[in-house]
Image (cartoon, rainbow, N blue to C red):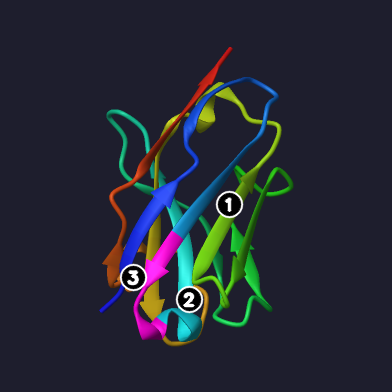
Amino acid sequence: QVQLVESGGGLVQAGGSLRLSCAASGRIFSTSTMGWFRQSPGKEREFVAAITWSGGSTYYADSVKGRFTISRDNAKNTVYLQMNSLKPEDTAVYYCAARGGGGLYYSQTQYNYWGQGTQVTVSS
């Protein structure tokens, strides 16, 4: 069992930066693929980024590539999402997700555990 708690969301102006954190409890964190997803009002939840258990491989949605960076610290059971050059269209609730085992996945159906989400609002 893995429990996930996101933090770091807030209000920021366009062009600004935020760093989201996701603290995980549970022994399988260090062997889990981790992902970030987001959901805007009236839209379906969409993939943002994923990272393998070792941190050796990452994968990004085209909409955030070059602006967002996913990373993890297995000693702290934490995964991060550094978000730079934020745009109003990045406004959403951001969710952390975990999947036991290897591989990189962009489909939310592949993830077993989810956090409650943290709100990110980017003003123009």
Residue at x 44%, y 61% (from the top left corner): 23
Mark toward the start of the polypeptide (2 vs 3): 2
Q: Nearer the viewer, residue 62 or 67?
A: 67
| Label 3 SS | loop
| Magenta highlight range | 23-28
Measured as percent of width and height from the top left, residue 10 is found at: 48, 29
Which residue reaches farthest top?
124
Q: Secondary structure at mark 1?
A: strand
**Tag 1: amino acid:** Leu
Question: Going from the N terminus, do you reach mark 1 or mark 2 first?
Answer: 2
For the residues labelled 3 and 1, the Cα–Cα distance comes to 17 Å
Residue 36 horizontal/vertical position (percent): 46, 56
Q: Which residue reaches farthest right?
A: 66
Between the C-alphas of marks 2 and 3, the distance is 9 Å
Count neighbours of disc 3 (C-alpha within 10 A) and say few if under 14, some if 14 to 19, many if 20 or more: some
Residue located beneath label 2 in the image: 33
**48 or 34: nearer the viewer:** 34
Q: Is residue 86 above or below residue 44?
A: above
Give the mark, 3 or 1, whose residue is nearer the N terminus. 1
Q: Quadrant of the N terminus?
A: bottom left
The C terminus, quarter of image: top right
Residue density around tag 1, few if under 14, some if 14–19, many if 20 or more, within 10 Å: many
Locate residue 50 relative to residue 54 in the image: left or right: left
Tell which of 29 and 15 is nearer to you. 29
Task: Residue at 43%, 79% (x, y): give it.
Answer: 29
To which residue does mark 1 refer? Answer: 81
